Amino acid sequence: GENVEQHPSTLSVQEGDSAVIKCTYSDSASNYFPWYKQELGKRPQLIIDIRSNVGEKKDQRIAVTLNKTAKHFSLHITETQPEDSAVYFCAAKGGGGNKLTFGTGTQLKVEL
Amino acid sequence: EAGVAQSPRYKIIEKRQSVAFWCNPISGHATLYWYQQILGQGPKLLIQFQNNGVVDDSQLPKDRFSAERLKGVDSTLKIQPAKLEDSAVYLCASSLEGVSYQETQYFGPGTRLLVL
C-alpha cells in the first residue's frame, strides 16, 4: 500500500519568513495530493491540493509543488503569520481507489 | 452549506465497554469515511462507504469495530469491546464522489474517545 513520509515533524519560523514542508510517497500511481491544516482540537481543513497532471499550484501565500519522478511534493508558505501556526498534514491518494494516506504531520510555529 | 456533523464530541468509557459514534455527511455527498487519529499522528482510514456500500475496510479491526451506513446518508461506527489503545479522535469525512475532481474530503469536528 501507499506510504507517505513527512518532514520536518516540527518547524519554527519567524513571522514573515517562509516555511517549507516536504513529503514523499511510495505509490507511483498516486494522482492526488491534498494538504490539510489542523489547529489544536479542531478538524483538518483542506488548504490546497494538486493533481498529478500539474507540477505546481499557488493560492495567495500558499503553493504546492509536485515532482512525480522523485515522488515528492512540498508545501510552501510565504510571509508567514501567527495564524499559520498549526499542524499540517500531507496526503496521497493511490491510483487504485480513493484511499487517502496521510503523513505524520508537521507542527508549524510562527513566532513574533 | 452545512458541514459534516458528528456526535458525541467527547466520550469517556472503561475498557471492555461499548461505544457508538454518529456522523451526518454534507448533503449530497455519496462517499463517507471514518478515520482514526491517534495523538501526534495523521488520520488513518478505517472504512470508506460509497452510498451504503463498503468500498474499503481493510484497516478496520473487524473483531471489535463495526460500521454501517443505512440509506446511504448517516453512518454509525461502533467499538465493542473497547481497548485502551482505542483512545483517539474518530473523524468522519465526506466527499461528493470518489472519482477524480470530486474527491475533496471534508472533515467533521471529530469525537474524542478516552478509554480508561
Image (spheres, grey):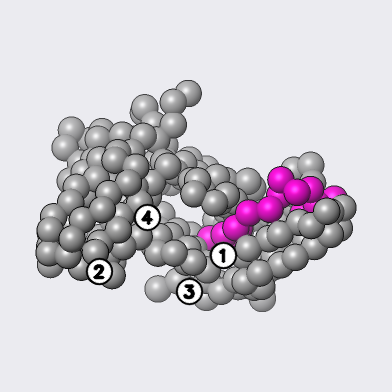
Q: Position of residue B10 (x, y in %)?
A: 32, 46
Whether residue B46 appears in this view of the structure is no
Disc on the earlier residue, 4 or 2 = 2
- Categorize mark 3 by other alpha carbons within 10 Å: few (<14), some (14-19), many (20+): some
Q: Chain of mark 3?
A: A
Question: Which of the chains bears the disc numbered 4?
Answer: B
What residue is drawn where x is 39% and y is 35%?
B4
Q: Residue B60's image quarter?
A: bottom left
In the picture of the structure, the residue carrying the numbered disc 4 is B89
In the picture of the structure, the residue carrying the numbered disc 2 is: B84
Q: Secondary structure at mark 2?
A: helix
| Rendered location of residue A18, percent (x, y) | 83, 59
Q: Residues within 10 Å of mark 4 (few under 14, many from 20)?
A: many
Nearest to the observer: residue A13 or residue A60 = A13
Q: Quadrant of the N terminus of chain A?
A: bottom left
Q: In the picture provided, is B110 more to the left or to the right than B56?
A: right
- Label 1 in the same subunit as label 4: no
Mark 2–mark 1 CB contact (< 8 Å)? no
Nearer to us of marks 1 and 4 is 4
* Image location of residue A42, percent across then percent down: 50, 46
Give the amino acid type for the residue marked by disc 3 in the picture. Answer: Asn
Amino acid beneath label 2: Leu
Q: Is residue A49 left or right of residue B26?
A: right
**Is A16 on the left-hand or right-hand side of A98?**
right
The span from disc 1 to disc 4 (Cα, nearest Å) is 15 Å
